[in-house]
Amino acid sequence: MGTEQQDRPVALVTGSTSGIGEAVARRLAADGARVVVHSRRSTDTGEALAAELGGTYVRADLEVEEETRALVGSALDRYGRLDVLVNNAGISWPIPHADLAAATPADWRRLLEVNLIAPWVLCTEALPALREAPGGGCVVNVTSHAGVRPKGSSVPYAASKAALNHVTRLLAAALGPDVRVNAVAPGLVDTPMTKDWTQAHELWRDRAPMHRPAQPADVADLVAALIAHRYLTGEVVVLDGGLNLT
């Protein structure tokens, strides 16, 4: 690998074979990063995207701690450095908020494992490399509008994202100045997963000042801006087209 290649930053983006994660991976590659693409499934898609972006692909199930830890190790084995960690991967399914019995302890454990504990494990594993990154390492957590307002697909999902928002601030305070930690909290994003969310699409069209949901590229642009900004840390930036104003 030539010196020019070795000088390019390395970014690990979890859950990056579709939707927001894919858009982030494409944006960071366009900005010059060598991107580690990740998914739990979608191996063929991940390998094809990594090849297209000139990066590498690693499969890992973030519900399994050993695989989560090994994900960072695989990135370091491949490139010998890690400058940016984007914790994008998450899981969700609808559970009515008022139906307390439907949100079982098993649901809570699974949502917290992937949406909160896995990002913590990844940050822990990545920290030594992030501390050594030229110009300082950076973590961006992709959380949710549901983590700042009483909404979301379920109570445990919203709680997992609210907790990740607070962890973002705690880590920023603990790890500066060597490592910056910020979060993006999107509202509705127009992805294949949300295409049938008719009520949510109507809400954003009718009440958000921007009169539309976000596109994945909108989220990717903000992630890239947070990575580029060498002074900003500890912020949870709500990206909801202004819906919070209404």
Image: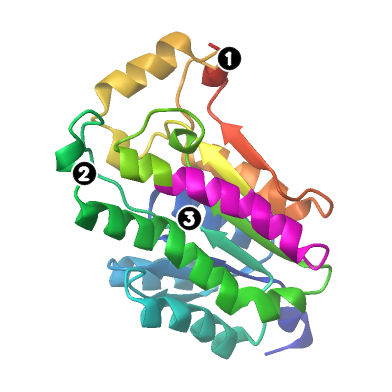
Residue 187 spot, x, y in % from top left: 47, 31
Q: Quadrant of the N terminus?
A: bottom right
Range of residues picked out in magenta: 160-182
Query: Is the Cβ of the residue at disc 1 closer than 8 Å to that at disc 2?
Result: no
Q: Earlier in the sequence, mark 3 or mark 2?
A: 3
Secondary structure found at label 2: loop
Residue type pointed to by label 1: Leu
**Distance of label 3 from label 2 (alpha carbons):** 23 Å
Mainly helix, strand or loop, the magenta region?
A: helix
Secondary structure found at label 1: helix
Residue 221 picture quarter: top right
Looking at the image, residue 227 lies above or below residue 118 = above
Q: Which residue is mark 3?
A: 88
> Which residue is drawn at the image coordinates 29% and 38% (left, top)?
154
For residue 59, the mark is none
Q: Which residue is mark 1?
A: 245
Residue 22 picture quarter: bottom left
Q: Nearer the viewer, mark 3 or mark 2?
A: 2
**For the residue carrying disc 1, how many other residues have a C-alpha within 10 Å: few (<14), some (14-19), or many (20+)?**
few
> Which residue is drawn at the image coordinates 82% and 55% (left, top)?
230
Magenta segment: does it hold 151? no
Q: Earlier in the sequence, mark 1 or mark 3?
A: 3
Query: Is the Cβ of the residue at disc 3 closer than 8 Å to that at disc 2?
Result: no
Residue 142 spot, x, y in % from top left: 52, 49
Q: Which residue is mark 2?
A: 103
Residue type pointed to by label 3: Asn
Instruction: Answer with left or right where residue 202 lies relative to residue 137.
Output: left
